[in-house]
Image (cartoon, helix red, strand yellow):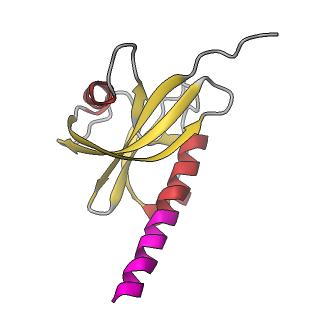
Amino acid sequence: MSANPPTIRVLAALIQRDGRWLLGQRPAHKRHGGQWEFPGGKVEPGETDVEALARELREELGLELVSLGAERCVMHDAGSPFEITFVEVEARGAPTALEHSALAWVAADEFGAYALAPSDVICATVLCDQRDAGAADRRAIT
């Protein structure tokens, strides 16, 4: 009987500006290469979530973390030890593709035009569902 490998915590930053979400295209040589993702990375031993996202945003995008918001989705990345937590993030600066092949600001209704990594597809669906539910709630109030 083999033990399950330990779960590795990964944080994905949900950065939204002017109604658009920041996506990065994964380099071809990495897992899910060429696919698009919400940027982020692994939490290193001894790091808090704030420290990890501050480091990842600086290393990958040249951004400064301003604040961490709500966790919107948590899921296991099939075929890996990664558990990805998608968290709302406010960041300062203009993003630069320091580790991604490309960056894009994408409206929720445009997610389908991007080949998203598997876990990111699920989170994008949740974001769209929550946006649609919020719009319905707003219509009901007025």
Name the quadrant containing residue 83. top right
Range drawn in magenta: 129-142
Residue 135 is a magenta residue: yes
Residue 60, given in percent of the width and then of the height, sits at 32, 29
Residue 120, given in percent of the width and then of the height, sits at 53, 45
Q: Is residue 85 visible?
A: yes
Q: Is 62 left or right of 28, judged from the image as shown?
A: left
Given residues 137 and 32, the one toward you in this image is 137
- Total labels drawn: 0
Given residues 132 and 60, the one toward you in this image is 132
Q: Residue at x 64, y 15 (%)?
A: 5
108 versus 62 height, above or below: below
Q: Is 50 left or right of 74, judged from the image as shown?
A: left
Name the quadrant containing residue 80. top right
Q: Residue at x 32, y 24 (%)?
A: 48
Residue sticking out furthest to the bottom: 142
121 versus 61 height, above or below: below
Residue 22 is a magenta residue: no
Name the quadrant containing residue 87. top left
Q: Residue at x 47, y 38 (%)?
A: 85
Q: Is 78 left or right of 68, judged from the image as shown?
A: right
Q: Quadrant of the C terminus?
A: bottom left
Q: Is residue 115 visible?
A: no
Query: Magenta: predominant secondary structure element?
Result: helix
Q: Residue at x 44, y 67 (%)?
A: 131
Q: Quadrant of the N terminus?
A: top right
Residue 13, given in percent of the width and then of the height, sits at 37, 41
